[in-house]
């Protein structure tokens, strides 16, 4: 909260470590607001900015011809993350509400 204030929502995917009751309790105790496991559609990449936007940017920024070991992969990943512009991050997060509404209109089915 000292970095972001209190006007934000934490979201995580449905992986077992994230949906475990102790993880959920920690989130309730440490975040101003977060989407609890029972309030989020299961397996929905449509609502995760990393899945519908950021991962593509990350992968496209990597120089795959320079990756030949774990060390070079880590180096390329770090360089790739730095190339993702703030505007891409903000735009992907800003369209989240619209994506949520479209999912609602589509009876919680995946977006096309």
Image (tube, rainbow, N blue to C red):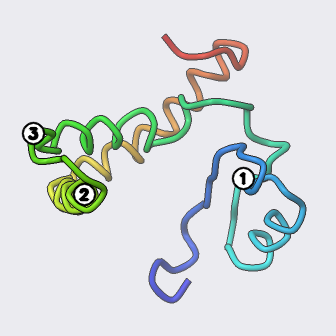
Label 2 to label 3: alpha-carbon separation: 17 Å
User: In x, y percent, where is residue 11?
Assistant: 62, 53
Residue at x 25% of width, y 53% of height: 69
Residue 48 percent location from the top left of the image: 52, 40
Q: Nearer the viewer, mark 1 or mark 2?
A: 2
Question: Is 21 placed above or below 41 here?
Answer: below
Neighbours of disc 2 within 10 Å: few (<14), some (14-19), many (20+): some
Residue denoted by label 3: 65
Residue 35 - label: 1
Residue that appears at 31% across and 44% down: 91
Pick whichever, 105 or 64, lies toward us. Answer: 64
Picture coordinates of residue 28, whole percent (x, y): 79, 70
Q: Is residue 52 above or below residue 77?
A: above
Give the mark nearest the N terminus, 3 or 1.
1
Residue 101, position in %: x, y? Answer: 59, 27
Few, some or many residues within 10 Å of mark 3 (<14, 14–19, 20+): few
Q: Does residue 7 appear left or right of residue 32 in this picture? A: left
Q: Are marks 3 and 1 in contact (CB under 8 Å)?
A: no
Q: Is residue 100 left or right of residue 30?
A: left
Residue 30 versus residue 60: which sits nearer the camera? 60
Q: CA distance from mark 1 to mark 2?
A: 26 Å
The residue at which mark 2 appears reads as 81
Ranked by sequence position, the earlier of labels 2 and 3 is 3
Counting residues from the N terminus, which is met first, the one under dot 1 or under dot 2?
1
- Secondary structure of residue under mark 1: loop
Name the residue located 32 percent from the left edge and 52 percent from the top edge: 90
Q: Residue at x 70, y 60 (%)?
A: 34
């Amino acid at each position: 909260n000292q970095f972001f204030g209190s006007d934000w929502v934490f979201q995580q995917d449905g992986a077992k470590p994230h949906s475990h009751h102790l993880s959920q309790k920690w989130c309730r105790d440490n975040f101003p607001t977060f989407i609890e496991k029972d309030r989020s559609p299961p397996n929905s990449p449509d609502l995760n900015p990393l899945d519908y936007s950021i991962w593509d940017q990350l992968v496209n920024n990597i120089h795959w011809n320079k990756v030949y070991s774990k060390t070079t992969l880590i180096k390329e990943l770090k360089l790739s993350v730095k190339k993702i512009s703030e505007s891409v991050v903000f735009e992907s997060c800003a369209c989240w509400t619209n994506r949520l509404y479209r999912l609602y209109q589509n009876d919680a089915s995946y977006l096309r």
